[in-house]
Image (tube, rainbow, N blue to C red):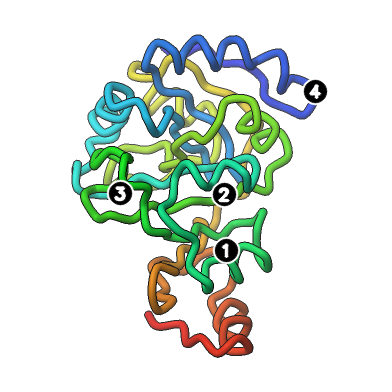
Amino acid sequence: MALVLPFTDATCDRVLPDVRRVLDAHGVVALPTETYYGLAVRPTDDAALRHLIELKGRPSDKPILVLIGSRDQLPQLVQSIPPAAAFLMDLFWPGPLTIVFPAAPDLSALLTGGTGTIGVRYVPLPQLRHLLQHTGPLTGTSANRASEPPLDHAAAVQGALGEGLELILDGGPTPGGLPSTMVDACDRPQLIRAGVLATDVIRTALARQGYELSS
């Protein structure tokens, strides 16, 4: 079973050595986000990405989103920042909005699903943002097996996935409910997934800048 460590503002720095140890060994860390628990590996680590895909039973052609702890981590992940994406970043980041960008050309197809794009979210959760500022970007796909519901308690993650995980950061129950909202901003803004951030709020904001949000 996975090692479980408390994850709060007060323990962020204490868990860093364990997180780095697992990441260095191509392992998977479960951690809380502003919606559900997620599964974190380094986005540049193909061995860890394969482990993650196998653990979830996830199709290899389905993209895996990435979490960042500061905007200066974005350039290593994206080829460009389209104007609509820049506008959404300024208005809604950090927050529960995953924006899809043109992917940096050296990103693995295991991460992009061969789409040439990458979904990125600048997380609002303070302790997770602090962690990511020290580890660099990490994946944030939901901590559940494919086709099963996402999980909002560390104990549930341990029960469902603990045998395949190396470490669970227990931040207590997450809000659950809707997932992050996802918008493809590569060309014409398109709603990929409705979520916590209301679609009407995004649509209205984009319309003021002359963009139409399609779905």
SS at mark 4? loop
Tell me the quarter of the picture where residue 17 sits: top right
Amino acid on which the number 4 mark rests in the picture: Ala
Q: Earlier in the sequence, mark 1 or mark 4?
A: 4
Distance from disc 1 to disc 4, alpha carbons, whole Å, reads 27 Å
- Amino acid, disc 2: Thr
Horizontal relation, residue 57 to residue 52: left or right: left
Left or right of 123: which side holds 144?
left
In space, the residues marked 3 and 2 are separated at their CA atoms by 19 Å
Q: Position of residue 101 (x, y in %)?
A: 42, 59
**Callout 3 amino acid:** Pro
- Measure the C-alpha gap from mark 1 to mark 3: 20 Å
Helix, strand or loop at label 1? It is loop
Residue 110 x/y as whole percent: 25, 38
Q: Which residue is mark 1?
A: 196
Separation of marks 1 and 2 at Cα, in angstroms: 8 Å
Label 3, residues with CA under 10 Å away: few <14, some 14-19, many ≥20: many
**Which one is earlier in the sequence, the residue at label 2 or at label 4?**
4
Name the quarter where the N terminus is drawn.
top left
CB atoms at circles 2 and 4 under 8 Å apart? Answer: no
Using the numbered discs, state the Cα–Cα distance from disc 2 to disc 4 in whole angstroms: 21 Å
Q: Nearer the viewer, mark 2 or mark 4?
A: 4
**Residue underneath mark 2:** 35
SS state under label 3: loop
38 is higher (above) or lower (below) than 47: below
- Looking at the image, residue 53 sits to the left or right of residue 71; the answer is left
Residue at 45% across, 18% down: 23
Callouts 1 and 2 close, C-beta under 8 Å: yes
The residue pinned by badge 3 equals 63
48 or 193: nearer the viewer: 48
Please give the residue where the numbered disc 4 appears in the rendered image.
10
